[in-house]
Image (cartoon, rainbow, N blue to C red):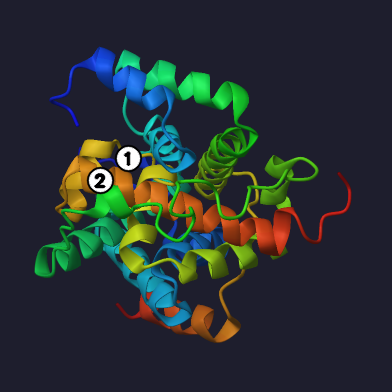
Amino acid sequence: MSGTPDAHANPAVDPATWLDDHGDALFRYALLRLRDREKAEDAVQECLLAALAARERFEGQSSERTWLIGILKRKIVDAIRRSSRESPVEDPEAAQSAGEGFFDNRGFWRALPARWKGDPGQSIEDREFWDIFRRCIEKLPVRLADAFLLREMDQMKSDEVCQVLSITPTNLWAQLHRARLGLRRCLETHWFAGRRKDG
Amino acid sequence: MADKRPTFEFLRLLFAPCDEIAHLTSQSLDRSLPWHERIAMKVHLAYCKACRRYRRHALVLREILTRYAARLEGREPAAGPALSPAARERIRRALINP
């Protein structure tokens, strides 16, 4: 640092307001990823403490929010990487059995995907939708949910996700397919085909 | 599968059932498909409503999560649960007394 007072260099950094300004956003992110309220609360606390310790390094180029979410994201990815290394699951037949249960023995859909009513994109405004989304994510095996959210929520490239999860691309593609099949069906049952009558 | 010649693989895929094409459809969101897979998939999707819907739904999931993540990172409010008052208080104390 160049001798400029901290507050002057980074007017955006004010730890006292972090919790009020960003606490809920951090919590929502963590809850979706960790699937457990207590773990999510701990992650928010850990994230803010890490940010407090590192606040001199905040460049002010990104917004405070982006910076904080970035710290949280890295912590979550590190945790996933650690647990994947400890017990890697490499399934050589994953690709063949990826659609198991969703298709009959001739390879046809057991239940045809339905038309989703209304404007599905609008669902993101709805708090109830996110409760259901979380419940559907919780129904997936942890590995599938991790793979899916790394890819779709963090927009990580496939090969990066493979590294984090210590799996091959073939396995990743099978996991993503399975996650999409499961999540799609669950959301259809509990949200898109059911309650929304506006379509 | 990769060592098979693309033309033969293409002809086989033209008659492949939904489970195989759905898997390709999903993969098309995660890697760029070689021509024989891409075209066989498109042919199948042209006549199969169920697989078309699977593709659309997978894209909707992607769109929803991308936009939700952008909102959580940005200024626009993102719907969802809030920290409980107890947790908020606990974290506040931890921040004052790290």
Residue at the location (58% across, 80% down)?
B84
Decide: is A13 above or below A139. above
Decide: is B31 above or below A31. above
Q: Residue furthest right?
A: A198
For the residues labelled 1 and 2, the Cα–Cα distance comes to 6 Å
Residue B44 coordinates in the image, percent (x, y):
51, 25
Q: Which residue is mark 1?
A: A156
Residue B88 coordinates in the image, percent (x, y):
52, 78
Query: Label 1 neighbourhood size at 10 Å, few (<14), some (14-19), many (20+)?
Result: some
Q: Quadrant of residue A155?
A: top left
Seen from the viewer's position, the closer of residues A29 and A83 is: A83
Q: Are marks 1 and 2 in contact (CB under 8 Å)?
A: yes
Q: Which residue is mark 2?
A: A161
Seen from the viewer's position, the closer of residues B14 and A75 is: B14
Residue B40 coordinates in the image, percent (x, y):
42, 20
Give the amino acid type for the residue marked by disc 1 in the picture: Met
Seen from the viewer's position, the closer of residues B35 and A31 is: B35
Q: Chain of mark 2?
A: A
Q: Chain of mark 1?
A: A
Does residue A5 show up?
Answer: no
Look at the numbered disc 2 and give the secondary structure of its residue.
Answer: helix
Residue at the location (28% across, 40% down)?
A4
Give the amino acid type for the residue marked by disc 2 in the picture: Val
In the displayed structure, does residue A90 sit left or right of residue B85? Answer: left
Earlier-in-chain disc, 1 versus 2: 1
- Quadrant where the image shows the N terminus of chain B: top left
